[in-house]
Amino acid sequence: MSEPIIKLDQIEKHFGNVIALNGVSFDVRAGECHCLLGDNGAGKSTFIKTMSGVHRPTRGTITFEGRPMSFSSPRAAMEAGIATVFQDLAMIPLMSVARNFFMGREPTRGWGLTRRFDVEKANAITMAEMKKMGINLRGPDQAVGTLSGGERQTVAIARAVHFGAKVLILDEPTSALGVRQTANVLATIDKVRAQGVGVVFISHNVRHALAVGDRFTVLNRGKTLGTARRGEITSEQLQDLMAGGQELAQLESTLGGTV
Amino acid sequence: MTNTTDTASVDERIKAEPLLARLMKRPELGAIAGLVLVTGFFLATASEAMFSLSGVLNFLSPAAQLGILAIAASLLMIGGEFDLSIGSMVAFAGMIFGACVVNLGLPLILSIPVTLAFAALIGAANGLIVLRTGLPSFIVTLAGLFMLRGLSLVGLKWITGGSTQLRGIREAVEGDLLTPLFSGDAFGGLFAWLAQAGLIESFPNGTPKVPGIPVEILWFVGLALAATWVLLRTPAGNWIFAAGGDATAASNSGVPVRNVKIALFMLTAACAALLAVMQVMDAGSTDARRGFQKEFEAIIAAVIGGCLLTGGYGSAIGAFFGSVIFGMVVIGLTYTSFDQDWFQVFLGGMLLLAVIFNNAIRKRVTGER
């Protein structure tokens, strides 16, 4: 097994007297999808923000491509190759797909006063990248507002990969989607993984995680409870770990195992 | 998990878009439709003189003066902010310019940059206050509207020793090399030649009835083209749309939202100052009432041109047409038998229609139902 691209060891994050993270260890290798599972309030958001350079850890070490690393800003993390797709997707509904795709990183042509946004190139790349992900746009000038939730998620993922993400952090990408759209997003994750990107898939939905994940780590009350490989763990066990082994066993019997 | 073909092939549920529906998505469509309507109205009701060469230049001149403000205001609105202080800025910048030319005796090559820089500085201050406090720019620049107007009154009285008008500007700038760039008419030679050749109307002595194109119209057209180029064909244009569409999302994607907004505030103020320079040189005097309520007219022209009040959508060409509609109605009513005060009724009606229309367009673009 290859070396991890990014490895976080015993990360702690305190906000005043609140201990949001209390010993989190996590790593991602190229070409794998590592699922981070946790219930609401487990510390998932704080952990993502620590990984993507928004927060600095209070204690613990981050190793990126074999070297200790401390990102000063989300921008620095992004430039190093850690891309995060947050739930809000950083997309502007009124703008076209192509303009969103290249927002803040517009390709240009020409020099001096004739230096301009290379619209043709942007359009062509956008159409090609979206096609690769299995989405046929009506045109590059189609507004993002007209896309479905799953398609928007795919645009955001395609954009991150196009701009050289080595690690792609997805914050609950399937949480607000219907069945078919979820399937599409999971298929997109599979394609991205096949390109050698390390995917961090954050979710509280065990079934979605099991569908695409290679390894699974459960976060509960600010701590990781160990990592399991695909096939080593069942959905019931993951469910139990997420809930901290409490009342869920009892719930399970009343709900007939549908959670 | 199988990859369903939900979107993988040409989607049979999407009908081919008719041309009209595509056109409907252009922000400036409303303004163009409005222009056609208004032109039709005056063709039917106004005397023929309105659409003669001199008549057209007659209504394009106030359109251009408003348009210089409106185009900058539209960029700022697309960037998600307002500036209500631009009308007062015309008076304030006029005072600075007048003081430079008359009291300090500076040549135009110094006076104009000083005036523009002064205005841009105040624009930057507006922008900084808006961004630092997170307050709506509407309220911050409303304060600016009153402060600059008051400062113009107080300042002019102080400079002139009691009057709110400063005269003697025409004498002071006469003979300056830069004067023809900012006042009077351009292409005088061409028009004289056209008159001699009998291609345009001339007086019995052979001089043309229209001495040339007022320079503000050239500035107006140039500015509209430049703003459109920036908006649609440069990275900065993409940043303006992004900053106004969703500042957080834009920021997270690496768009320098703060700098974009401050630059737009500076540009708007500088355009107000440019207008002030031209008006003051044309009139030969500066007055503390100059630019009164122009901020509202500029915003109305931008909205007629398709700008959304919420930002992130609009066009500079739309603001251009919005301003032309404006000039046409202000001047056009004098060519008809209607009372000129219908102008205000028209203004309000047009604004209401434009806002309703724009709202519908936005829903179409974003696919909301």
Image (tube, rainbow, N blue to C red):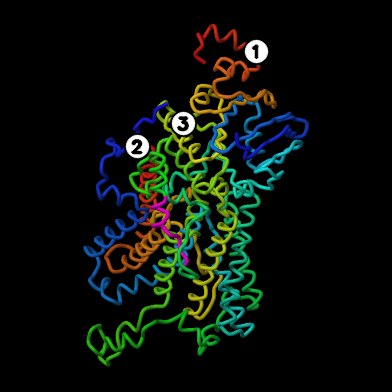
Q: According to the image, label 3 marks what residue?
A: A186
The picture quadrant where one finds residue A45 is top right
The crowding category of the residue bearing disc 2, from other C-alpha atoms within 10 Å (few below 14, some 14 to 19, many at least 20), is some
Is disc 1 placed on a helix, strand or loop? Answer: loop
Q: According to the image, label 1 marks what residue?
A: A246
- Label 2, label 1: how many angstroms apart (C-alpha)? 43 Å
The crowding category of the residue bearing disc 1, from other C-alpha atoms within 10 Å (few below 14, some 14 to 19, many at least 20), is few
Of circles 2 and 1, the one toward us is 2
Q: Which chain carries label 1?
A: A
Q: Residue at x 61, y 78 (%)?
A: B99
Q: Which residue is drawn at 67% across and 26% down?
A: A224
Residue B8 numbered mark, or none: 2
Q: Which chain carries label 2?
A: B
Q: Residue at x 36, y 79 (%)?
A: B213
- The magenta segment is A115-125
Tag 2 and tag 1 share a subunit: no
Instruction: Measuring from the top left, give residue A252's x and y in whole percent.
Output: 55, 10
